[in-house]
Amino acid sequence: MWLNLLLASCMCCLHVMQTAAPGKAVESSSDVTLTEIQPAARIQLPAAIRAAPAPILEIPLVRISNPQEMSFSIFVSLEWSRPAQRAAGKEKILLGNFTVYPPDRPGNYILRASTTFEKLKALGADLGRDQIVVALEMKRTNPNQPWSPVEVEIGPLRWRSDNS
């Protein structure tokens, strides 16, 4: 019985660790979890958005555990790997950032993405074919203050037009 409980708890944690791993991009329909230990995550940009980029990105913070109410921001970038060069040719363009306030309450945050897509195209990105990911990184608002326990669950990103 104890072995089953241990295995079950390990399997539950495995999902969180996989979604929070900064080196590997998860599917666009996945939730990701950022923590003070794993403050970065990467999400694949859906093919439909690469084919017809939506100008607005909505980032739903569905759950926040921040008992000490540490102030933090989330930085959002688009990463593009040049097909011929892979890691050496990776471009990272800041899409925007926001400070979560109050720091312990979930909510939706909206960023304009159209300029970032234009910059990618100017660099030579073929949005329809190339590998593009959304990179999320949580940073302390005051970098001189040590991290306290923070866990932020981000739901699937929502792309939309100006009209919706």
Image: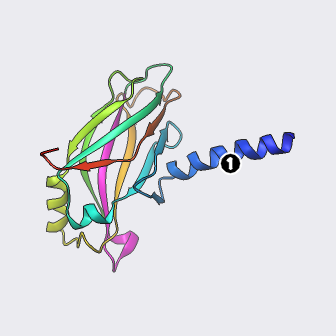
Relative image position of residue 78 (x, y in whole percent): 29, 56
In the image, residue 27 above or below residue 107: below
Query: For residue 59: magenta?
Result: no
- The type of residue carrying mark 1 is Met
- Quadrant that contains the C terminus: top left
User: For the point 40% across and 28% down, which residue is it?
Assistant: 144
- Above/below status of 131 relative to 142: below
Q: Is residue 11 left or right of residue 155?
A: right
Asked if residue 84 lies in the magenta stretch, the reply is yes
Measuring from the top left, give residue 120's x and y in whole percent. 20, 63
User: Label 1 belongs to which residue?
Assistant: 11
Q: Depth check: 48 or 130 in front? A: 48
What range is drawn magenta here?
A: 72-90
Tell me what residue is drawn at x 26 percent, y 61 percent.
Answer: 49
Asked which secondary structure carries label 1, the reply is helix
Give the image quarter of residue 99: top left
Which residue corresponds to the image point at 31% horizontal and 66% vertical from the top-left?
Answer: 47
Q: Quadrant of the N terminus?
A: top right
Q: Is residue 71 above or below residue 89?
A: above
